[in-house]
Amino acid sequence: MEEKKLKFNSKAIHGGQQPDKAYGAVMPPIYQTSTYAQTTPGGHQGFEYSRSGNPTRTALENSLASIENGNYGLAFASGLAAMDAVIKLLNPGDEVVSTNDLYGGSYRLFKQIFEKYGIKFHFIGMSDAAAVADYINENTKLIWVETPTNPMMNIIDIKAVAEIAKKYNILLAVDNTFATPYLQTPLDLGADLVMHSATKYLGGHSDLVAGALVVKDKDLADKLYFIQNASGAVLGPMDSFLVLRGIKTLHVRIQRHCENGEAIARYLSSHDKIEKVYWPGFEDHPNHDIAKSQMKAFGGMISFVTKGNSYEEAIKIVERLKVFTLAESLGGVESLAGHPASMTHASIPKEEREKSGVVDALIRLSVGIEDEEDLIADLGQAIG
Ligand SMILES: *Cc1c(COP(=O)(O)O)cnc(C)c1O
């Protein structure tokens, strides 16, 4: 259809959307209903029960499919609920190859929920994509990629992993939460499935929790829809409306996140108290060339380490911040700072987390869309 020819900014606003059939409302109404009147058993207008389908959720799902260059979107109650549906495609005895530097909640879902159902997970470094092939056997059914990774901002070559996945006929899923489809569209690079924590950039205003899946293939979409309806972790109409509203400004927000992100990454790397800044836009980032080829820009997520690697000093810095808020999560319009060693990654033993670079002094920033000068001044006074 014509709409597929639209460019990204237009799709963010119009993708999959039509004025509402009842009164021509330009924004899809919040259909706050569990059920729909039928004229005769089975005589309904496409919706019968809101777990199976709700018009506001459908509007969001169509928008998701459009912006990720897929054919089918599915909206869930959280990012982890979306992932849960993907793993339910598998059977006991199946194996998954996953990146080792991934969102902590994803790791917990794989290890503490699904391993006990007989699914085996291999957590490996994927900065060299060829390593994936070493962990594939006849039981491997899924490759799980997250790029850029959290919190170390490693970059994984989606196209190279997709070639391995195709060769062995294995499903490739990409968690696109950090990049968003404005910066990177994994389905165009050969992935079969894109997952989002829509809580983050897609919603964009830190006012909801939501998840999303997007695929191209009808058969895969049907299987996921069956799980979505049968397991029931659907997104409600109010939150569907809010994510849809967030998506309409995704492109302008991400542009500013990227501009501010770059300014702050460069400021920190020139600061004499800073040891190291992790941001894929730097030429000396190990996979900078891959980031450049698969992403439109480098995003607003940055991690950094102060000289001396002091736990206490890192805590003091995040406590002194005034414009940045000390909080979990990311991707909202407001700047947030976190201390992985005591917050998101506290449950991982020190030796384990240090292996992947999560040292005591590591601070993670989700750079918002405030004025760059205010953000830099705030970091300046906090670092001292
Ligand atoms: C937050 C996050 C998730 C989990 O999503 P929820 O919406 O919190 O369930 C998964 N992956 C990444 C990269 C995230 O940042």
Image: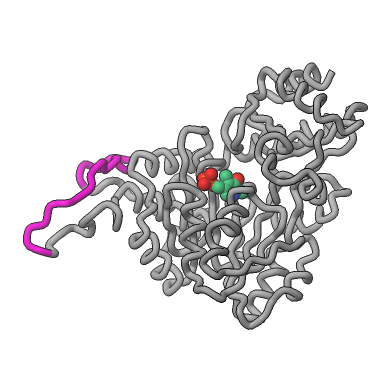
* Residue 316 vertical position relative to residue 216 in the rendered view, above or below: above
Q: Is residue 298 visible?
A: no
For the question of whether residue 78 can be seen, the reply is yes
Residue located 63% across and 24% down the image: 325
Magenta portion: prevailing SS class: loop
Total labels drawn: 0
> Which percent across, then down, holds residue 234?
37, 51
234, above or below 133, in the image: above
Measured from the top left, where is residue 77 in percent x and y?
A: 42, 47
Viewer-nearest residue: 294 or 93: 93
Q: Quadrant of residue 320?
A: top right
- Name the quadrant of the N terminus: bottom left
Q: 12 left or right of 331?
A: left
Q: Position of residue 32 (x, y in %)?
A: 26, 41
Name which residue lies at 71% across and 46% down. 348
- In the rendered view, tell whether residue 384 sits above or below residue 171: above
Judge whether residue 285 is colored magenta: no
Residue appearing at x 15%, y 59% in the figure = 44
Name the residue at 90% across, 35% down.
Answer: 275
Position of residue 7 in the picture relative to residue 295 (left or right): left
Q: Which residues are magenta?
A: 22-41
